[in-house]
Amino acid sequence: LSLLILGLWLVLAPAPTLGQILIGVSLALVLPWLTRGFWPDRPRLADPIAALLLTLRVLADIVVANLEVARRVLGPVGQLRPAFLEVPLDIRDPFVASLLGSIVSLTPGTVSIDIEDGVLLVHALHVTDADAAIAEIKTRYETPLRKAFAC
């Protein structure tokens, strides 16, 4: 978490000066310590490489999905096929399931709506094959999350 905070701080900083680095390091050390009470049963990262690869995949998917959504929205609206998807989850940890919901919501064109009884409810802007869309969420995001957190 500290590395993530520091990395985000440096990416968002206007210039990586010594002052910005010191502020980032301070926040990276203090914020996790201040918020530890909110995370009593947080899962431990079991495979940092899998987490890094998932992060890179999500970032790439955000870029690609933005372009795809722009193309669809600027095209004929009548060709959009919005749908609700019920994604059955193999993840049982509530934190990791919430993380999956957040990842789905970060990807333009999809919004996670609810997680209940082991099912993630997702609204997608354009779906031609619901089963394929569900399988894609499970293989692209859920499987790497399960590997990263060993759950």
Image: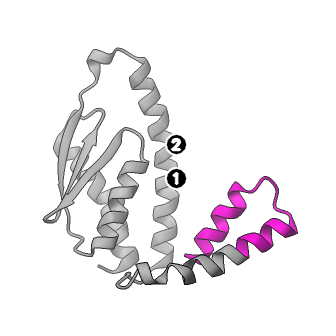
Circle 1 residues within 10 Å: few <14, some 14–19, many ≥20: some
- Range of residues picked out in magenta: 1-25
Residue 141, quarter of picture:
bottom left
Horizontal side, residue 128 vs residue 69: left or right: left
* Labels 2 and 1 touching (C-beta < 8 A): yes
Look at the numbered disc 1 and give the secondary structure of its residue: helix
Residue placed under numbered mark 2 in the picture: 63
Q: Residue at x 48, y 46 (%)?
A: 62
- Residue 5 horizontal/vertical position (percent): 61, 69
Residue placed under numbered mark 1 in the picture: 59
* Residue 10 appears in the figure: yes
Q: Residue at x 36, y 69 (%)?
A: 145
Specify the quadrant that holds the C terminus.
bottom left
Q: Residue 91, relative to residue 39: is it above or below?
A: above
The secondary structure making up most of the magenta span is helix
Residue 3, quarter of picture:
bottom right
Horizontal side, residue 46 vs residue 115: left or right: right
Residue 77, quarter of picture:
top left
